[in-house]
Structure formats: C-alpha cells, structure tokens
Image: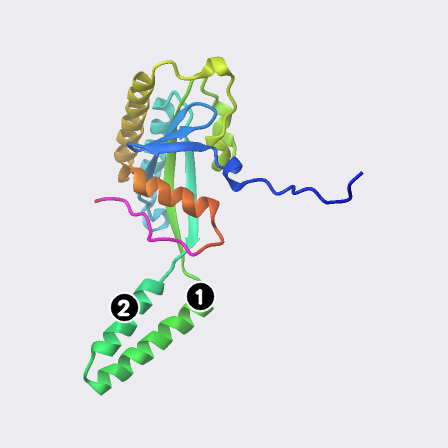
Amino acid sequence: MSNTPKNTTAPSQQFVEITKVEDGVVYLKKGGIRKIIIVSGINFDLKSETEQNLILSSFQDFLNTVDFSVQFFVHSRKVNIDTYMERMRARREEESNELLKIQIDEYINFIKTFIEQNKIISKTFFVIVPYEAGDAIEQAKKGFLSFFGKKQSQTEDVPNAQAAIEQLNHRVDQVISGLQQIGLRAVPLEDEELTELFYNLYNPQLVEKKGIEVQK
C-alpha cells in the first residue's frame, strides 16, 4: 500500500452553487433561479414611537402579502479607503503650496491612524427572491449561501425558462412594491453587482471591490 498522501483539497469551484449570472438572474447548479434586491436602511432609533409603530405595522402587512419564501440578508464588511488615500497622495503631489502640502500630509496621517484604531464597517441590506419547482419555505431559515444550494431531483427542473423568469420578476415586483410602502428604496442587482457581491462573499479574506449602492 502506498504511503503517498492523497490530495484531499477540493476545487473551490465545487463550493460555488451558481452556474451563471445573466440579465440580473442567478442560475443555480441544482436548478432554480434567484434575484437579489438591494434595500436602503432606516435609522429606526431616530424615529418617533408613532413612526416606529407605523413601520412595524407596514412591515407586518408586507410579510402577510408574500406567499413565497424570501430571505433577508445583511452583509457587513470593512470599508476599503485605499483608493481615497491614493487620490489624496496624488493631490498632494500636484499641490505647489507648501503649507497645503503639510496640511494634506497631516490629514492623511490622521485618517490612517483613525482607521487603524477604528475599523469602519458598512452594512448592506438584501432580499433574495427565489423561483424553483417545489419551493421550500425552510430555505429562508438557512444561511445566505445555502439559500443558493437547494437540492432538487432531475424531475424538479423548471420546465419553461421564460415562464420561470416571468414568475420570478412578478415576485420581485411584489417585494419591491411592499418595501416601498414601508418607505424603503429597493433595486434589483444587475450582473456586475451580483458578480461583485458573490466575489466578496466567497472571498471575505481579500480586499473588497467598490461598494454596491442603492440607486436613487
């Protein structure tokens, strides 16, 4: 028997449950499709008691109107200011006034020290809307990435891709309309934004790309 250790390292691709992202739709390996909506936040603590009760009531009404599974997901990540710092250094090099150069240096050092001592964390809010044969409500109870990995049999594939996308879009419109009633801006992510989101989720140890923002 050979004592040569076997390579047990699995390819990273096998952990990615997505086959492709096209026209704002996420296609899964095991069947089913998803759309992801980015949602603005509300500073709930700054609202009056009356406003808070109205928000809670509106959110409850929204949940009661949804007859399919959805998942709410909060993505927290450290803000990367490298690009901003590079612009400031470039601005310093262009400056001819020595006093302003000194002030820019002091500002850069202040920002650098502040970031080292106080990590700036941004939070982004998403709603994942699914469509697949045999939707399962329990999927909403699982983790974000597992929500993209529901196991299906060969007979559970969506029979009509265009009809499935139409149903998914209808669900997305319903969710957006409900969120707008609460006073939230909600926008479906496009291909580039979806790719960036999953890149950050599957590579949390790497420096993240530019942030995703809710369109106004």
Residue 189 seen in render: no
Q: Position of residue 120 (x, y in %)?
A: 41, 60
Q: Residue at x 30, y 65 (%)?
A: 84
Residue 172 seen in render: yes
Q: Quadrant of residue 184?
A: top left
- Quarter of the image with the N terminus is top right
Q: Is residue 117 above or below residue 207?
A: below
Name the residue furthest right. Answer: 1
Residue closer to the observer: 46 or 205: 205
Q: Amino acid at mark 2?
A: Arg
Residue closer to the observer: 174 or 156: 156
Q: Residue at x 45, y 20 (%)?
A: 135
Labels 1 and 2: the sequence-earlier one? 2
Q: Is residue 119 above or below residue 137?
A: below
Q: Is residue 111 above or below residue 142?
A: below
Please rate how many residues cluster around mark 1, counting C-alpha atoms within 10 Å: few if below 14, some from 14 to 19, many from 20: few
- Give SS at disc 2: helix
Q: Main secondary structure of the magenta part?
A: loop
State the CA–CA distance, disc 1 to disc 2.
21 Å
Name the residue furthest bottom. Answer: 98
Q: Quadrant of residue 51?
A: top left
- Quarter of the image with the C terminus is top left
- Give SS at disc 1: loop
Res 87 label: 2
Q: Position of residue 14 (x, y in %)?
A: 53, 35
Please rate how many residues cluster around mark 2, counting C-alpha atoms within 10 Å: few if below 14, some from 14 to 19, many from 20: few
* Magenta extent: 207-215
Res 118 label: 1
Q: Amino acid at mark 1?
A: Asn
Residue closer to the observer: 211 or 27: 27
